[in-house]
Image (tube, rainbow, N blue to C red):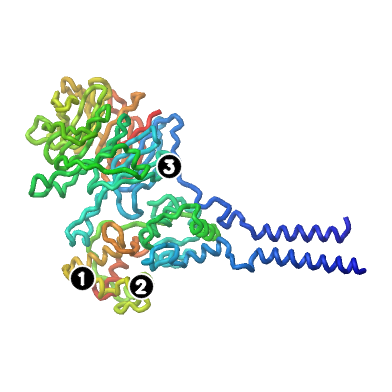
Amino acid sequence: MSLQQGCQQCLLATVAVLVMGCSSSSRDGETGEAYPNRGPTFEARGRRLGYVANRNSDTVSVLDLDAMTLLGSVPVGRGPVDIDGPRHVVIDADRGLGYVALSYPFSVQSPHVLSQGGTQRSGYVEALNLLDLSEAGELRVDPNATDVAFSPRSGRLAVSHMDLFLALASDPDARRANLVLVDPASAIAARTATANRVKLCSAPASIAFDGEGARLFVACTGEDTVSVVDSQSGNVLSSVPAGAAVVNKPYALVTDPARDRLFVANQVSYAVSVFDMNDSPNLLNTLHVLGVPMFPALVSDTVLAVPFQNPSGASLFDVDTGEELVQVAFSETECANPAEFSLTRDSRLRLVCEGDHYRPGAVVELDPETLAITARVTVELYPERMGILEP
Amino acid sequence: MTGRTGGRTGERLLTGVLLCGALGACGSTSEPSAVDRGRQLLDSATLSASNLNDYVCSTCHDVDANPTPSRKTGGALAGVTLRPSFWGGQEGDLLGAINACRDHFMGDNQPLAASDEQARALYAYLQSLEPGDARPISMTIVTTIDPLPRGDAERGRDLYAQACMYCHGSMHDGRARSSDRVPILPEDTIAEHAQYSARVQRLVFIEKIRHGLFLGYGGVMPPFSIEVLSDAEVSDVLEGLGAIGE
């Protein structure tokens, strides 16, 4: 190669370098990955995962329930400043989605808003991708969205609104809040969902489907009743007293379709009413609790674990006889304001502890026979319930 | 000779053409780089498609963290591409954080996708600012509005110049405010809430500073966190504005 030829090749190489040098580099945003996802992901990989909505910190915490460890907490909601108040995550395992109700608990504390008459903000239901809790879609519902229920069998979703502003209306008919039915729930993620409103009762709180997702049981706090609703037509099939006391104040409500049992926790009568799951439920027994009962769970065919607050503790009851088998008290550091028991298929028992709503709450694991706490995971502010994804 | 001369002439011509072409491709054309486009976007209202948008990123954000505390409501941008969270931990995705700004303050609720040209250019510029400060920036929102004691008027006037004047213009006449839609302080805001008692007027001023458009108020103003303005400094601003309310 002559010097001249060498220079020509050198020149061409230089030009090539110059041209390449001004093409996109990895730092110019045109060829590299812009906005790489640095958030946590939560692959189940055969594990049981728990999804806990933290109402006052606008996050959902994800737990490995087998190892009883916190995998991470992710902010959810529609706005980065507003307190969206996520309440309860229900799991659509087949579609890899969770649904969470956004309640906006502080929307009428503003002096500006109050001076204008206290307009309330609409609630929302958000569909979340369970893998990373990113938003997959949303649906506007009514103010004070409270509980959300999902039926894997029917694919339907329901939202209650424990609206205490409506409940103060002088006209009894105006006190009734809507139940929102969404069929199918997956339409929320497809952004094609319609909210079908059923005017139901005063201050409906907790809701739960039957096994087929055909009927919905509703704790009507403001009317002291339990209502049963056809989840397809929205027709109210029945409304029965929530308990045997003169005033009961139902709040938490849980169904166990396999055992044909409906449990209603009453906050004034300090009692759990045990019903069957007929269209018009029959009261079978009343379990008298030391404190304010919350969401119970059956730990065997006949033994019900009941968390209670004020004071914080829990009991085991024989649901047939009403006998209290075990009662334990929890300290503030163990489990302040116990809220919801859940039993997974491997017979392990967990309990969500609300905390005092200003300091973090927790999820604890307990011995199902003694209710002794064996493990504890701290989550964030004001958890109440846990959605569970089982393998 | 001729051939050789002609050959050299041809080589020189080729060299010139290639170099000019190469250099021309590099920078003398009108096509700016993605970093430059992103830098321009940062100070351009075109990041929002809304005709009503009066704001740009630098309205609320410094590029670099100032050695003295900035009174801008948003965090410094250098390092933002490395931060794990935004908006005081309430947003985990950078593009989500940008889209929240576009939606709430800039009037454009159509989110940018990561593949959009504007989004990519903005990212290219923000990435060019690395490393910056990759730590999350605290942003504590005062959710409950309580009455505040009287403050210091002189300090309040200084704080007004640092924190409020960029958008609201000078006190009492709004000179150089960012838009005719931005209220002149305090007169326009008092007039808008004339039906309220003096006590509630003071709470409304505090609320507007603390919540901005959020938590049920409305408008386009960002919230001042406790880290940017302490309660004592909010008292000073109110005093500087002329002892708002009771």
Camera-side mark, 1 or 3: 3
Mark 3 lies on residue:
A132
Q: What kind of residue is marked 3?
A: Asp
Q: CA distance from mark 1 to mark 3?
A: 47 Å
Q: Residues within 10 Å of mark 2 (few under 14, many from 20)?
A: some
Horizontal placement of A271 versus B101: left or right?
left
Q: Is residue A214 above or below residue B215?
A: above
Q: Chain of mark 1?
A: B
Q: Chain of mark 2?
A: B
> Which of the pair B227/B165 is nearer the observer?
B165
Residue A264 found in image quarter: top left
> Which of the pair B169/A28 is nearer the observer?
A28
Instruction: Estimate the x, y position of residue B190 in percent, counting from the top left.
Output: 23, 72
Horizontal placement of A354 versus A5: left or right?
left
Instruction: Estimate the x, y position of residue B15 in percent, counting from the top left.
Output: 78, 65
Residue at point 30%, 49% (across, down): A84
Q: What kind of residue is marked 1?
A: Gly
Q: CA distance from mark 2 to mark 3?
A: 40 Å
**Residue A55 visible:** no
Horizontal placement of A322 versus B39: left or right?
left
Q: Marks 1 and 3: same chain?
A: no
Camera-side mark, 1 or 2: 2
Instruction: Estimate the x, y position of residue A344 in percent, counting from the top left.
Output: 34, 27
Q: Is residue B238 above or below residue A232?
A: below
Mark 2 lies on residue:
B179
Mark 1 lies on residue:
B245
Q: CA distance from mark 1 to mark 2?
A: 26 Å
Q: What kind of residue is marked 2?
A: Ser
Callout 2–callout 3 Cβ contact below 8 Å:
no
> Which of the pair A241/A109 is nearer the observer?
A241
**Residue A20 visible:** yes
Query: Counting residues from the N terminus, which is met first, the one under dot 1 or under dot 2?
Result: 2
